[in-house]
Amino acid sequence: MSTELTSASPVATYFAPAGRDQPDELAHKQYLVAAVPLLQRTIDAMSDIVLILNGRRQVVAANRRLLELLECEPEAVMGRRLGELLGCKNAAAGPDGCGTAPDCSLCGAVNAILESQQVDDQVTRECRVSLADPIGAALDLKVSATAVGMDGERFTICVAKDISDQKRLGVLARLFFHDVMNTAGSIQGCTELLRERLPGDSAEDEDLAELAHLAEDLVEEIRAQRDLTYAENGELEPDLRPVATLELLQHLQRTFARHPVARNRTISLGETWVGSIVTDARLLGRVLGNMIKNALEAIPKGQIVTLRCVERGDEVVFSVHNPGVMPDEVQRQVFQRSFSTKSKSGRGIGTHSIKLLGERYLGGKVGFTSDPADGTTFSIGLKKAPSEQAEHR
């Protein structure tokens, strides 16, 4: 337990220091903050909860968003702490309110505030506030705390963003992908089992082979959507291993040759550097696979999409070429998340995922060229064996 000497008596706590300003001290700090030009109007314009705290984590200013949520006047929040305002059940469990109970050591909000005061900088943490009422309810918040000085006094600007919906959707997404992957995997397994039980020359074997391919495609599509969802949430962890370049391109060539979009079109394997690089084969396959699908969709029947892999120093550049050309307005928007040439409803996920997975998670450099003379080529350059493949967050 820590001990803080207050104007009344020493109070031992389980985590954050105890002690609160006397009314005249609190009023003085409220005055200092209120005297800053445009500060109140600025925080009132923000859609998240904004509090300005004194050195003892007490509110000396709050924005309109908080007052609207609590349906109260500014006087009702002054001198209180964040957990006390939100109704955290731990606020009443400590000897001096919010921050002083045993479970407060696990609170991201309190930790962000205390650390910000220590390092004199901005600190961001996530926290889950268990509410006293109704029982079992909770809030998920992302709290950013920034220490500032003013007229010799120390304050903390605290911004709390409600991410409960985001967290709830994340849980539902994980449950969905888990359950649907199990179902699709079961279909795939049952299909293979049926094929094993039938003679190889039976009339049903060809149909089951096609069903097995469709089941495999379904599983792969679910995995692709799962990876993209996790990637956009910053939750994807690449699995870096040696990957043989020729084997990867040959696998992609075979896989997409039977894709419906490849009907009456050819996928050719051009110049290929034969070697190995350290990367995530699954994610690289996603990137190149989207390049291939886009290229096949962009050309008329009878034309060719060409896959290449060339060595350039300590890098390897994978590319997908088609003889078509993209209009200038398409080129300027091609990597935007919701841009698509196919509809107005925002289907543009493929090229967005190429950029997201290729650069943020594989640490590569994604680019393209498109002109009437040379057609269109999308490419990704990767280090052969990088020490730091990507920044995951």
Image: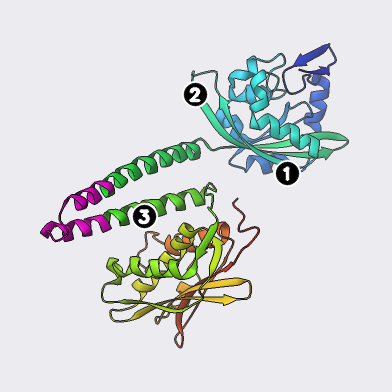
Tell me the residue that label 3 is attached to: 220
Is residue 179 or residue 355 the one in the foreground?
179
Q: In what element is the residue under mark 1?
A: loop
Q: In this view, does 282 lie to the left or right of 152?
A: left
- Residue 198 magenta-highlighted: yes
Which of the labelled discs sits on residue 38, or is there none?
Answer: 1
The x, y position of residue 324, in whole percent, is 39, 80
Which of the labelled discs sits on residue 345, or is there none?
Answer: none
Residue type at mark 2: give it: Ala
Q: Can residue 71 be seen in this view?
A: no
Which of the labelled discs sits on residue 137, or is there none?
Answer: 2
Q: Which of marks 2 and 1 is in front?
A: 2
Q: Do the residues labelled 2 and 1 touch (CB within 8 Å)?
A: no
Q: Earlier in the sequence, mark 3 or mark 2?
A: 2
View extreme (top): residue: 9
Q: Would you say the magenta stretch is mainly helix, strand or loop? A: helix
Is residue 266 or residue 196 the one in the foreground?
196
The x, y position of residue 88, in whole percent, is 59, 22
Residue type at mark 1: give it: Leu
What is the distance, in whole Å, between disc 3 and disc 2 at their CAs? 37 Å
The x, y position of residue 111, in whole percent, is 70, 31
Q: Is residue 374 above or below residue 208?
A: below
- The segment highlighted magenta reads 189-213
The x, y position of residue 51, in whole percent, is 68, 34
Which residue is found at the position 53% from the left and 53% from the top?
238
Q: In which quarter of the image is residue 8?
A: top right
Q: In what element is the residue under mark 3?
A: helix
Which quarter shows the N terminus?
top right
Which residue is found at the position 24% from the left and 46% from the top?
190
Is residue 254 or residue 144 the one in the foreground?
254
